[in-house]
Image (spheres, rainbow, N blue to C red):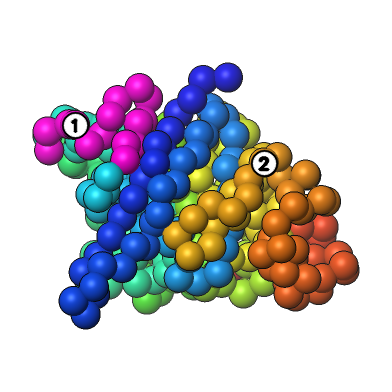
Amino acid sequence: MTSVLTLENIVKTFPHHRRVFTAVDDVSLNIQEGTVYGLVGESGSGKSTLARCAMQLMRTTSGRAIFEGQDLGMLAPKALRTVRSRMGIVLQNPVAALNPRMTIGASVAEPLRTHTSLKGQPLQARINTLLDEVGLGAEHAHRLPHQLSGGQCQRVGIARALATSPRLLILDEPTSALDVSVQAQILNLLQDLQQQKGLTYLLISHDLDVVRYLSDEVAVMRAGKIVESGPAEQIFANPSHDYTRKLLEAAPGHGQPGIADSHTFNTQGSD
């Protein structure tokens, strides 16, 4: 398998009350093409900070983020922006992620205007195709975010992330703000898109059911460090670290069928 994203000894610190707070502490991981890499841990464990370092939306204190063989930290801003067209991110709060004054079509068009030369009818055609791929229709392009449900806004967020045909998508708590039934629809959609397009995902979540459902590989993060990693089946069936075992024991419905075992929702259903 080809490596899409490699993080080598990533450290990210912040000044905090005359001290230095270490949000990410010497983290290394390797994500293979066409796989889903799940990063799980409690809120505040450093997961989202690590994701932003991976895209160089936040510069690392030390360590390297290597995407498609390129060290992102060594790239000039213009070159980095070009590389970022091959990466997309889906954020936690789908409504807040959209400009309330911009139509859905305009929001989806933003990355296309930045990274492509599409204009006029070809641009509109691409917008309509993207909306269709995420289970919306061309009619949604003329609506504002407040006219859509949370699940529909997240579909728009996914369409934006897919706009430039990225190789890697970072999914930062993509379902945590949604109702359980809508979570299932969005997860099914993400799984379908991953299989259809051969996408690679870095999935960040505190929800073990979500990680179990989608992931091939899993890393468990605590206080900025990776405490355990390996194949998803192994991590969930036979965790080796006490922290992982405690997370599993504390999960809602521990030992009972959860969202990962009961996805019977259609991705085109109402949300």
Q: Position of residue 154 (x, y in %)?
A: 47, 61
* N-term mark: 1 or 2: 1
Residue 267 — which label? none
Tell me where residue 192 sits by quadrant.
Answer: top right
Q: Residue at x 51, y 20 (%)?
A: 2
Q: Position of residue 77 (x, y in %)?
A: 12, 38
In the displayed structure, would residue 135 be above or below residue 270? Answer: above
Q: Position of residue 255 (x, y in %)?
A: 87, 67
User: Local crowd at mark 2 within 10 Å, few (<14), some, or many (≥20)?
Assistant: some
User: Label 1 belongs to which residue?
Assistant: 74
Q: Assess whether residue 72 is covered by the magenta stretch.
A: yes
Q: Nearer the viewer, residue 108 or 137?
A: 108
Judge whether residue 207 can be spotted in this image: yes
Tell me where residue 34 sits by quadrant.
Answer: top right
Q: Is residue 235 shown left or right of residue 154?
A: right
Q: Secondary structure at mark 1?
A: helix
Q: Nearer the viewer, residue 181 or 105?
A: 181
In the displayed structure, would residue 10 be above or below residue 48? Answer: above
Q: Is residue 77 shown left or right of residue 116?
A: left
Q: Is residue 174 shown left or right of residue 115?
A: right
User: Label 2 belongs to which residue?
Assistant: 230
Q: Position of residue 22 (x, y in %)?
A: 34, 62
Q: Residue at x 48, y 65 (%)?
A: 223
Q: Assess whether residue 86 is covered by the magenta stretch.
A: no
Amino acid type indicated by mark 1: Met
Residue range (magenta): 63-77
In the displayed structure, would residue 264 be above or below residue 229? Answer: below
Dots 1, 2 in contact, CB < 8 A = no
User: Local crowd at mark 1 within 10 Å, few (<14), some, or many (≥20)?
Assistant: few
